[in-house]
Amino acid sequence: SRTKGNKILFCTGRSKAEIYPELWEIGFDGMVGGNGSYIEFENEEIYHKTLTKEQCEEIIDWLYNNNLEFYIESNGGLFASKNFEKVGEPAIEKYSRNPVDGSIMTIRQAFPEMIFDGDVIRDDVNKISFVLNSYDDYLKAVERFPDLQVGTWGGAGNDALFGDIALKGINKGKAITKLVEYLNANPLTTYAFGDGAVDIPMFEAANTGIAMGNSSLEVKQRADFVTDDVDENGLINAFKALGLS
């Protein structure tokens, strides 16, 4: 696809610290990270919004007071709370379980460069993810931080494994719009691939939204095109079907 002049970027909830070298080596022109809080194109940062240090401290105090373990997501690294490795292990096992062979990942396998003894109160934080002891923890966070964006991931509704807290008014769709404007590109030539509800704003911003075959029904219904599962060559099959490769 890149050989035809197309530009390909990650668009992910991950921060730059989680985009490991082996992922960049696949071949990308840039990334949208933190669910839209960071945009980089050809090694140049073109947009970045972070929580303030005061907001970070307020969130962390609340999480500790509610016995919720967490990790800080910043471009400079992932920083774990005191007991995140122990408390987060069951959630990561559920999140990473392979449906074919049942294999699972540990915290250190899932986050190979996570820092377990660093300062978690920082001024460069894209978002903060925390382990849900129950869905009620998410609801309490929504009530406590009305001025911030509180979400869940690792499952829908009561099955969610994690909550996350970030700046309000940021999403993948808005980031794509900013990127298209920066590149002075034709919006009609934009394609967005996704598999989660968090990707729906991306479908709305791009001319063509493509849902992976493993997406939920809601995501598929909001897409313009549905391809095969990720593990069944869904990306390359869509590239071919849409004339991108």
Image (spheres, rainbow, N blue to C red):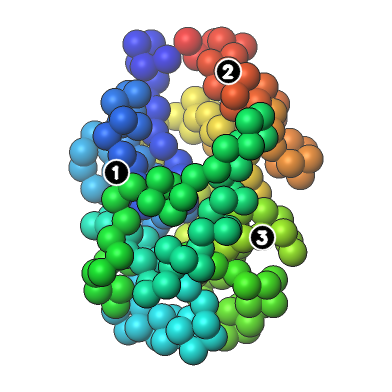
User: How many angstroms separate mark 3 from mark 1 (CA)?
Assistant: 29 Å
State how many labels appear: 3
Tell me which label, 3 or 2, sits earlier in the chain. Answer: 3
Determine the secondary structure under disc 3. loop
Q: Give the mark toward the camera: 3 or 1.
A: 3
**In the rendered image, is residue 216 in sight?**
yes
- Identified at 44% across, 54% down, the residue is 107
Answer whether labels 2 and 1 touch (C-beta < 8 Å).
no
Picture quarter with the N terminus? top left
- At a point 62% along the width and 72% down the height, the residue shown is 133
* Numbered mark located on residue 145 in the image: none
Looking at the image, residue 159 lies above or below residue 25:
below
Instruction: Report the side of 200 relative to 84 (left or right).
Output: right
Q: Earlier in the sequence, mark 3 or mark 1?
A: 1
Q: Which residue position holds label 1?
A: 40
**Amino acid type, mark 3:** Ala
Q: State the SS at label 1.
A: strand
Nearest the eye: 52 or 67:
67
Residue marked by disc 2: 233
Given this view, does label 2 or label 1 mark the residue nearer the observer? 2
Q: Secondary structure at mark 2?
A: loop
Q: Which residue is mark 3?
A: 160
Q: Nearer the viewer, residue 154 or 13?
A: 154
Q: Residues within 10 Å of mark 1 (few under 14, many from 20)?
A: some
Q: Amino acid at mark 1?
A: Glu
> Which amino acid is tagged 2?
Asn
Q: Residue at x 69, y 77 (%)?
A: 136
Q: Position of residue 73 (x, y in %)?
A: 37, 61
Crowd around label 3: few <14 · some 14–19 · many ≥20 (10 Å)? many
Badge 2: residue crowd in 10 Å (few <14, some 14–19, many ≥20):
few
Q: Is residue 214 above or below residue 144?
A: above
